[in-house]
Amino acid sequence: MTGIGVLRLPRDVRLGFGQRHAVPALATGFGSRIAVVADPFLAATPEFREIVAAMEAAGARTLVVTDVPAELPVPAVVAAADTVRDFAPDVIVGYGGGSALDAAKVVALLTSHPGPVDAYYGENAVPGPVVPLIAVPTTAGTGSEVTPVAVVSDPGREMKVGISSPWLIPTIAIVDPELTLAAPRGVTTHSGIDAFVHAVESFTAAPLDIGHDAVIPVFVGRNDLTDAVSLQAAGLIFRALPRVLDEPGDREARADMAHGSLLAGMAFGAAGTHLSHAIQYPVGALTHTPHGLGTGALLPYVLQACRDVVPDRLAQLGQALGLDAGGDLADRAQSAVDAVADLCARIGLPVSLTELGVTPAYRDRIVELALQSRRLIGISPVPADVQVVGAIVDAAIAGDRAALRSVPTHP
Ligand SMILES: NC(=O)c1ccc[n+]([C@@H]2O[C@H](COP(=O)([O-])OP(=O)(O)OC[C@H]3O[C@@H](n4cnc5c(N)ncnc54)[C@H](O)[C@@H]3O)[C@@H](O)[C@H]2O)c1
Ligand SMILES: [Fe+2]
């Protein structure tokens, strides 16, 4: 127990097979001008066309924007926002994976407030409400349908950059596992393990002292309202992810993944994530590898470094993963770390950063850039300085957790 609780959510969250059928009526409830920001591949699917046709049949005018590339380069997002602003929408629907949902968030922001977009980078820089947003994810998933963050690529910056504000939380989230059934193996693996990392990092993040001001940090660390949500998410994804990879048409496992990634988004949307994310950002920028591939590959190393600092949290995590609850605390914590490493191996993630293309020449730059993600570093369970982050990166490059069993930590 931390004695504090923070949870921020859309005003309407729905989960279940077929829930997408509610989207047209929910959207027209805001007015008759509906902009849709969609992934280009998914915009061609019958499920998507049916939603747009139903909106039009209800008398709405629709504008479908599909030309924002997955990495969300700022110029493309700004161009999409210009088109959408001219259309003057009553509501924006985001439809696709995390990329399309993040694009919809930034389009909503720039439709409602003047640019430049870099005025909103970082935390709490969005000045007020944005156009209502309905988020419909097709991956399980980033959790972006419930989170206060969108990530863009700014050509002037080495790493992707986040815009984090409670004003970016979608008004409505509609999570229909049916939409994830055709997701390819790579997308299922990377978005699925990233959701697991969200669950585990939100459960282990250090709690911040948030005081009593109206404006508090967007990400406040673990707290009494997110803990149970994180643990349930971790358990669901731990069991379901190998199953959806073995049998992509397993509807029950797909539903559990959608459920788990949604819960993980709810938890990390308030608690935040920490070192796997801080280290992945430079790794992703240097190697051009998917976000979840990096966060997943790094998680066992990060947890190993945290084992002696938060053994009780890791033991609780182990219990949520279905591990034996008996024995010494340190052993239970280690079993949880080993179980996470086993999951990563079982779903085919690389064991070392070397397999992602990280050479020792990148090492110092990765450590330096990781430490610049101050909001992530600030809620790391293990106080993260150049020595600790360096030890994690060294171990992850070597593909060997042994050296992290005695990471130098500060009192
Ligand atoms: N805002 C947040 O809270 C948050 C959290 C984590 C990650 N992210 C961001 O999300 C992005 C990754 O999102 P993602 O992993 O959901 O993937 P994505 O949206 O980048 O999509 C990846 C690919 O999968 C395809 N795809 C998506 N759903 C599909 C489906 N159901 N069937 C077939 N193909 C499908 C897309 O067409 C695309 O080619 C990253 O840019 C990351 O930075 C955001
Ligand atoms: Fe992530």
Image (spheres, rainbow, N blue to C red):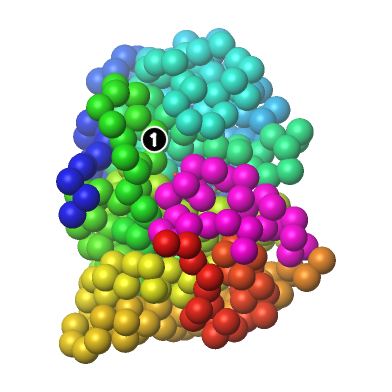
Q: Quadrant of the N terminus?
A: bottom left
Element under disc 1: loop
What residue do we see at 22% from left, 31% from top? Answer: 11
Residue 54 is inside the magenta segment: no
Q: Is residue 43 above or below residue 181?
A: above
The x and y percentages for residue 231 are 25, 63
Q: Nearer the viewer, residue 173 or 396?
A: 396
Q: Which residue bears the numbered disc 1? A: 218
Residue 385 is inside the magenta segment: yes
What residue do we see at 53% from left, 57% from top? Answer: 384
Left/right of residue 226 with respect to residue 63 in the rendered view: left
What residue do we see at 42% from left, 62% from top? Answer: 411
What residue do we see at 29% from left, 22% from top? Answer: 214
Q: Is residue 332 above or below residue 266?
A: below
- Magenta-drawn segment: 362-387
The x and y percentages for residue 42 are 50, 47
Instruction: Determine the residue located farthest toward the front in the rendered image.
Output: 411
Q: Quadrant of residue 287?
A: bottom right
Left/right of residue 307 with respect to residue 123 in the rendered view: left
Residue 327 appears in the figure: yes
Q: Is residue 345 above or below residue 55?
A: below
For the residue marked with disc 1, what is the amino acid? Answer: Val
Q: Is residue 275 above or below residue 268?
A: below
